[in-house]
Image (tube, helix red, strand yellow):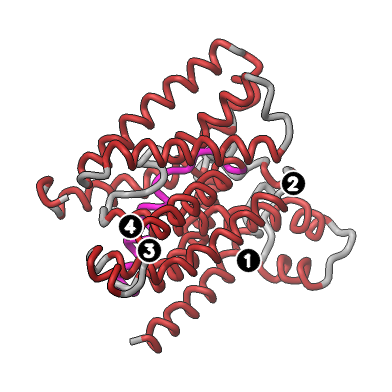
Amino acid sequence: MNASRTTALAGCAVVLGVVAVLSMGVGAQPLAPAEVWSALVDPGADNASLIVWDIRLPRMLLAVAVGAALAAAGALMQATTRNELAEPGILGVTAGAGFGITVGTALGLAGTQYGQLLLAVVGAGAASALVYTVGRSSPVRLLLAGVALSSVLAGISLGLRLITPEVFDRFRFWAVGSLAGREQVPLVVPVAVIVVSLVGALAVSKQVSALLLGEDVARSLGVNLTRTRLAVLVLVTLLSGAATAVAGPIVFAGLIVPHLARRVAGMSVPWLVAFSVALGPILLLVSDIAARVLLPTGEVPVSIVTAVLGGPVLISVVRRRRTAAL
């Protein structure tokens, strides 16, 4: 079984490489895969090299980081809460990160990249803690608490943007969730936070697997329940906060990918996280490619594409299970 999973994971890595090269060829000036590869291995002063290195390569790397972060966060949330509907967008974590940035901007605290990242992480952490505290007694309450909090925070954020025009002008494009225009933003710090958090997610996944066996069994296996849940909360906060800080709120990526990964990973949380880290970037790159070609005169925000893809998945999950079983 592990050999087949390893082969499948290697296949995902190959698909990711192909999609990444294709994504760097799509845009206002199309480039053939051979041109993209030539620009990558032998860059020069030609237009293709400038386009690839200055615009499309940073955008591709951003899509990979954000896709992996949201997918891993969704996988951890679904495994820890035993709720197939759990994901950062639905449970209010993404809305909390966006709310933190909006409030910080209104107070003049989001002038730097570090400030935005810190505000997003604080907002995501507060939202995660609040939703879990209110809804931890049942998956249905957890879901309702997340949806309610997302609506409240979205309304307050919109009100702040309308009251303070400078906030609205600065964040009206960011608020829709898009990768366009982010390639010129320094990405070293948020990508580093995401990479470290992904390593942490893989490390804690074995303890999360023990939680699925029940609290008594997990304790007998030497798992510290409080420490494990706190670690998951911190990792989900960092992953969701960093992804939202650089790309805006993108929902359903953390819902779609774990459901696809679970078909191969089964009940193994380590494999679920590993496949989510591989499939998340593929989903976001494909969505970003679609966002560039759907309109002949411009781009569709990538969050709209993921929402269109994630809506049917959400409906299918709800229809597949009775409300009482959720």
Q: Tag 3 or tag 4, which sits nearer the N-term?
A: 4
Indicate the position of residue 209 as horizontal and vertical percent values.
Answer: 33, 69
Q: Quadrant of residue 57?
A: bottom right
Q: Gap between marks 3 and 2, in whole Å? A: 38 Å
Say whether marks 3 and 2 touch (CB < 8 Å): no
Amino acid type, residue under disc 4 in the picture: Thr
Q: What element carries label 2?
A: loop
Q: Gap between marks 4 and 3, in whole Å? A: 14 Å
Question: Left of 46 or right of it: where is 177?
Answer: left
The residue to which callout 1 is attached is 21
Q: Gap between marks 1 and 3, in whole Å? A: 43 Å
Say whether marks 2 and 4 touch (CB < 8 Å): no
Q: Mark number for residue 80? A: 4
Q: Tag 2 or tag 3, which sits nearer the N-term?
A: 2
Q: Mark number for residue 186? A: 2
How many other residues sit within 10 Å of disc 3, few (<14), some (14-19) or many (≥20)? some
Name above or below for residue 173 compared with residue 36. Answer: above
Report the mark closest to the observer, 1 or 3.
Answer: 3
Amino acid type, residue under disc 2 in the picture: Pro
Indicate the position of residue 277 as horizontal and vertical percent values.
Answer: 49, 65
Residue at the image point whose x is 35% and y is 41% from the top = 90
Q: Give the range drawn in magenta.
A: 246-266
The residue to which callout 3 is attached is 224
Q: Is residue 251 magenta?
A: yes
Q: Is mark 3 on a helix, strand or loop?
A: loop
How many other residues sit within 10 Å of disc 2, few (<14), some (14-19) or many (≥20)? few
Q: Gap between marks 2 and 4, in whole Å? A: 33 Å
Report the mark closest to the observer, 1 or 4.
Answer: 4
